[in-house]
Amino acid sequence: MWQVLAADTTRTRLLSEETELFAIVEGQDSAESSDVAWNAAMGRLVEVVEELGAIKADTAEARVRSILTGLGFTSTMQAGGTTTLSGGWRMRVALAQALFLQPALLLLDEPTNHLDLSAVLWLDEHLAEHFKGTLLCVSHDADFLDSTCTDLIHLSDRQLTYHSADVYRFFAGQRGREGKRAAAYKLQEETVKSFCKTLSKKQAVKRTLAKLGQEQLLDKPQEYKVQFAFQDPDDTMPTVAVLDAGFAYAPSPPLFQDLRFSVGTTTRVAIVGANGAGKTTLLRMLNGQLAPTTGEVSLHRNLRVGRYDQHFEELLSEEQTPVAFLRGCYDVDEQEARRYLGRFGLDGARHLIKIADLSGGQKARVVFASLALQRPHVLMLDEPTNHLDMESVEALIDGVKAFQGGLVMVSHDARLISETECDLWVCEGGEMVADGRSKTGIRVENEGFDKFRDDVLTAISRLAARESAAAEARAAQRKKAKATRLAASVAARAKVKKLLLIR
């Protein structure tokens, strides 16, 4: 919390000056100080107190606690330092600082990447309902953009085009716009070719521009088509059987106890919940990476699990090229490997360089190409949209919807969850109940995503209100104590002066 408060440098400076001035007017040497010096310090102190009131410094803690609660910080985390936080949580601190400052212009670059779904839903509502400045946001999350933005700026072929903020209408019209650009370029090339039969190339270009009403030649449209197509399994029998399973990271309380269910080729599940509730732990139990600490998780010997993990180094051989990696894992020739890589959006120039030299998004595409060749019975995906652009997220949604196998995923992308018609499993590991015990299970949200969204925002609102009320009470006490100190300083000074006069 203190890190976020410190972002307001004006408040920090005034509080520091206030402390120094109180030390002067209350100090042991104040009795010996001249009237001029003491009056100057007291006058400035009154000014500082008024300036702090003008910038609502007393309400700062309440506002910060409300923001941090919305971003998923518990009371304990808010009171602690940032040095113990992971990189993802530090990114949340930076986001909280930006929101706390209430700037006229807020620039956000993929703000949802390090958030869980609950925090994304809160940020969505906060920006849409409470942020009054100008927001410029880069994001691949269509649902988030659709809720928070009034206008879209699309960068393609080194040009910016402007659209209304209906993201889904934008996608629906994208194919038509691409078709028009392709047709215009084709007409231009045919016209130039026709004039070249009787004119020089330079004259033909000049006549073409005049005929088509163009100032310059159009660049050839660059095709960017991605297709996330996963091969369907050839049988539907193998499953994952979970029998009275539980898991705990000692010495912490259990995240799960007595889980009993199965996962097969007809399963469609999105695992949601707060950070630390056990989402990734559960996914790793189901795919065999983690053994339960109690009970049993049994994977059928013929089961093929298509695993996507945020930590690419666990899934890729980084010293190989993408083509060599796919050929080493599957019985495909170089042309077939390249075809799959291209289908998932990895350009040909990256096919024959080391995977270690690829960006995160490019590595993600190699993993997806590998999943397609694997022909899995069940896809298990952990935050699959983090490194994808918006077109690729749309392609992933289409690919997952068409896939005839099972799906278990952890995701903060509301559109991916709702469009793929997944059942919602809410991880509640670590949440406290009334008697102080931790919840240790999974709750199935039978009323759908909208009900989950409403419940999340209601719960966050209640927590934030409680944190803010406590902070406001502390601020009122500090304000009262400050007024008492000022009055006492004035009274003490008057008493000293009276004694000096008597002497």
Image: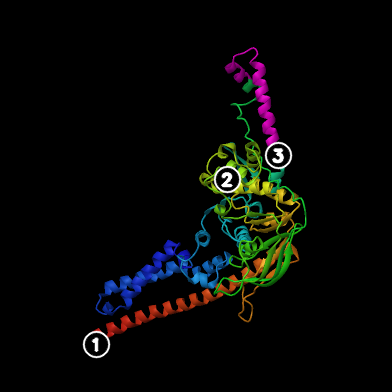
- Residue marked by disc 1: 502
- Residue marked by disc 3: 175
- Dot 1 or dot 3: first in sequence order is 3
Residue 10 location (% of width, % of height) = 42, 62
- Determine the residue positioned at 61% across, 64% down: 290
Residue 374 location (% of width, % of height) = 68, 49
Which quarter of the rendering shows the C terminus? bottom left
Circle 3 sits in a helix, a strand or a loop, which is it? helix
Kindly report the distance in space between the C-alpha atoms of the residues bearing marks 1 and 3: 93 Å
Q: Say which amino acid is labelled 1.
A: Ile
Q: Nearer the viewer, mark 2 or mark 3?
A: 2
Single out the residue that lies furthest toward the left. 503
Picture quadrant where residue 495 is located: bottom left
Residue 171 location (% of width, % of height) = 69, 45
- Tell me, yes or no, whether the highlighted magenta stretch contains residue 198: yes
Q: Nearer the viewer, mark 2 or mark 1?
A: 2
Instruction: Give the main secondary structure, helix, strand or loop, of the magenta stretch.
Output: helix
Q: Say which amino acid is labelled 2.
A: Gln
Residue 94 appears left or right of 427:
left
**Looking at the image, do the residues carrying marks 2 and 3 touch, with CB atoms under 8 Å apart?**
no
Residue 55 appears left or right of 328:
left
Kindly report the distance in space between the C-alpha atoms of the residues bearing marks 2 and 1: 85 Å
* Mark sitting on residue 267: none
Q: Nearer the viewer, mark 1 or mark 3?
A: 3
Q: Say which amino acid is labelled 3.
A: Arg
Residue 439 location (% of width, % of height) = 64, 74
Residue 409 appears left or right of 362:
right
Circle 2 sits in a helix, a strand or a loop, which is it? helix
- Dot 2 or dot 1: first in sequence order is 2
- Residue marked by disc 2: 362
How crowded pointer 2 is (Cα within 10 Å; few <14, some 14-19, many 20+) is rated as many
Q: Is residue 407 or residue 479 the one in the foreground?
A: 407
